[in-house]
Structure formats: C-alpha cells, structure tokens
Amino acid sequence: MTVTATSVDESDGVQPRTAPESRGARLLRRLVPAAAAALSGVLLYVSFPPRTLWWLALPAFAVLGWVLRGRNWKAALGLGYLFGLGFLLPLLVWTGVEVGPGPWLALAAIEAVFVALVGVGVAAVSRLPGWPVWAAAVWIAGEAARARVPFHGFPWGKIAFGQADGVFLPLAAVGGTPVLGFAVVLCGFGLCDIVRLVAEGRRTGAVRRGAAAVALLGVAVPVVGALAARPLVSDRAEDGTATVAVIQGNVPRAGLDFNSQRRAVLDYHARETERLAAEVEAGKVARPDFVLWPENSSDIDPFANPDAYAVIDSAAKAIGAPISVGGVVERDGKLLNEQILWDPDKGPVDTYDKRQIQPFGEYLPLRSLLDAINKNWTSMVRQDFSRGSEPGVFTLDGVRVGLATCYEAAFDWAVRDTVTDGAQMISVPSNNATFDRSEMTYQQLAMSRIRAVEHSRTVTVPVTSGVSAIILPDGTITQKTGMFVADSLVQEVPLRSSQTPATRLGILPEIALVLVAAGGLGWAVAAGVRGRRADDV
C-alpha cells in the first residue's frame, strides 16, 4: 500500500512533509520586502515640502520597521539602502537641475549608504524589548553622522525638516532637530510594533501586555510631549519690535548662467530697494528700520569696484536705512561669500563670512579627480571659497540680527551660535536661482520654519529669485513672494531674547540619543554573542 504524506498520523510524532518552496515563491518572498523598502522611502519623500503631508512619515517608518525587523545584517543593509534611495533620489533631484544627473545620482547613492548602515542597526536592535526606542535613536545617530561627514556633512533630508506643518513641531524648541526627528521616527516604529502585536495576538489568541504597553507608549509619548511643549512656542515680543524689509530683486534668467549677469542682479536689487523707498515716501508702506538683501545680490565686489559700491550706496541712501548686502569679495587672496552691513551714511561697516560652504558648489573636494572625470564640473568652480570663522550677528538700527547664509540653515550649530551670540532675530539670505523652480527652495524654507521654533526667533528669508518669506517665532509664514519675480516684503516683527531649552542645550540632546543608540547596539551584540554560545553548548 502506498502511503502519502497526508496519511501519516501526526499523533505518532511524525510531522507531515511540506512541499518544497517554488522558485516563484522564493522570488516573491524576496521582492516584496525590497519593494516595500523602496516604496516606503518614496512615501517618506512625499511627506516633505512643498507638500504638507508630514504625517506620511509615520507609515513610512512603520513599513521600514516591518521590513527590517529580525533581518540578518546583509538583508538589512540591502533593504536599508533601497529605503535610502527611495527617499533621497527624488528629494535631491534638484542637485542635477543644471549640471546633469551625474552629481545628483552620485550624491543620493553616497548618502543612501548612511541609511543602509542605519538599517543594519535597526535590524540588530529590533530583537530587543522596547525596540522602537532603540531603533529611533539609531536613526538619529545616522543623521548625526551624515551631518558631519564626508566634506563637513550634508544634513539635507533630516526628518525634522519635513515636520514644519506637523503636530510634533513644538519639540524643536525642546531639543532641536534631533529630538523632533526622534519623536517622529519613534512614533512610526511604535505604530509598526502595535500592528505586529495585534496580528500576533489574533494568531495566538493572547496579547503580551507588557510589550503592547511599551508599543503604545512609543506612539503616545511623542504626541503628548509635543502637546506639552506648546507653551514654549510663542510669537510674543520680548524686546519690542522692528520693521524689516526683505528685498527680492530677481535675476535675468534661471540656471548657472545667471552668474554671467552679475551687474544685472545687483541693479535689480538696487532698483527694487529704490522702488520700495518711493512707496515709503508716498506713505504707502511703513519705513523699515533696516533692509535685508539676499546672498549673491552683489557678486561684483563693491570693495574693488567703485561702480558696484556706488549702486549699493545709492540704494542705502534712498531707503534711508542700513542694508545687509550679500556679496562675493576677494580679500587677502581669499574668495569669500560675504554679508556686508551697509550704512546709508558710513558705507560698509561690518562683514560676515559664510562658514559652512557648500562642497561641489562653493568649493571642490577631490578637484584633480573630478577634473579627470569631467572638466565641465571643475570649470564651474574655478576658485574655491574660503570659510569664515566667526558667528554672524549684525547690529542693524539697534537690533541684533543673526545671519545663517543659505546652506548654513541646514546645520544646527550654524544657526544656534548666532542666537547664543545675542541675535534677537535671524536672517537666512539665500540664492536659489541655480536650481530653477525645483523643490529645493521649499525644502530650505521649511528648514527656516523649524529654526524659528527651535530658537523662538523671527526668521527672514531674502532670496534672489524666491521664495522669500517672513516667518514668526511660532513657525508661521506671514508673508512670502512668488518665484522669479521682483518683490519686497515689509513687516513689523517681534524681537526676542529668551532662549529655548533647545538653544541652551545645544548638542547635548543629540549626544544623548547617540549614546542611547550605542547602548542598544551594544546590548544587541552582547545578546547575539550569548545566544551563539548557548547554541554551541
């Protein structure tokens, strides 16, 4: 008699043979997590500006947690890399607007390596009790590394920068971008654990109450913490008010060749300032206490070119107020991206040199290697800019204004030290004309909104081609311009001198979260070693 696998009596302890897994089933088992990782990365990108879908970050991390939980390091490395590419490729597409896809693809590919390594860390701690806490700390540790290396770091795409419209925003005032980002990621991983435990309970008929309580806390604590932090967010004036004017002169045309029209750009900003002066004289607009021009509003060095000096001086006299002018100057053989404080009576009286200069935009690392690959890239940056060394705080008509020039807004330290140096408000002069109408300008504007809440300061964003804006200390945009139009914004804004916990604590919350990540990884490694030893016995 022939006995089939199904006719074996399982009560005898003999388990029925299972049919071998087909090639198609094996392929599907591998493809589904890979596709989920990449698509959840895309979902995270969609949560970023210019869209206001901040909440999509939560399901994005919930799916990532499901994909990575319990994986070995090789699988986690690949899945993390796919998540990173899904997120960073569309987020950073603006970097290739004028120079082609090569630099964009290279940047996204390199930055995604950090996410891949984070994926390994998340998979390692996913076996620990309360794993969402450890995993969220690992993510922030990855952001901390990415903000520092290579080439002095590239923090673009920090989770906090996608939360300007979200409920978690007040946490920026508690511990800056690391605490805000940690809360979002923790909430996402907490959602993953809740779904997992519910599914497990349905399958087994029992719910592990302790694990469920930890998972619920992972979701509830960030939300409750954000609500509790709301009193830290205020637009109340502490040191009176100031009437500020933001000038957007526009550029002749978008793209890299706007640099060849340097005199036109300068003339445009002077003309818009003089137009505003006429409106002030006519009583249509309040007289500003000071005026803010964008980065690169005078790429002609006014210290070396009398005609540029005369144009700026004439504009300052017309408006009758000091102007912060964005210039490119050469001093002692150094090329500097400089903000110049221009007094209507005394001329230039103070300067601030940009400290966090942009690699491959304002200086070229690996110049000889890049020259061998593509001479067009090196020709775009013929001379490297030098770095400044001191925080930028101008005293404009008695008001202390902190300066974080364009790219610097992405770096925590570059904004914070203007406030600790006494800034009562912050200005982020920028030049986005190189990136045309891409999402870059909206991503950068969201950073400035985060900085406003983080340090409880009014933030102005004067941009050559837009979007220029005035942001209150609570992160609200009260006025903004269109793109590639000449315009000006005038508003009375609150001045503040108190410091938020985030300002006072500085880097300490980030260090604490990195230590939590290290502790979780150490625990995971030790548990793995003990498990292997037990198996060998």
Image: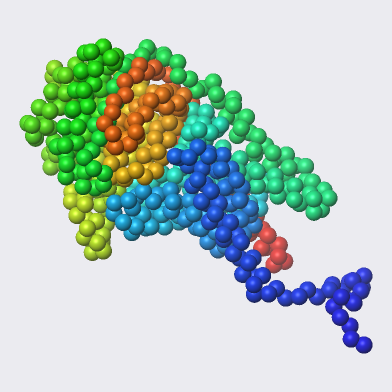
Q: Quadrant of the C terminus?
A: bottom right
Residue under the point 38% across and 25% down: 479
Left or right of 383 in this view: 208: right
Q: Quadrant of the N terminus?
A: bottom right
Residue 254 % position (x, y): 26, 44
- Residue 325 visible: no
How has the structure been colored for display? rainbow
Left or right of 440 in this view: 261: left
Left or right of 223 in this view: 116: left
Residue 376 % position (x, y): 22, 58
Count of numbered badges drawn on the protein: 0
Residue under the point 61% across and 40% down: 187
Residue 423, quarter of the rendered image? top left
- Whether residue 212 is situated above or below residue 8 in the rendered picture: above
- Residue 210 visible: yes
Residue 427 % position (x, y): 32, 28
In the image, 269 versus 62, the foreground residue is 269
Q: Residue furthest bottom?
A: 1
Residue under the point 43% across and 53% down: 89
Residue 260 % position (x, y): 16, 45
Residue under the point 65% across and 43% down: 191
Residue 529, quarter of the rendered image? bottom right
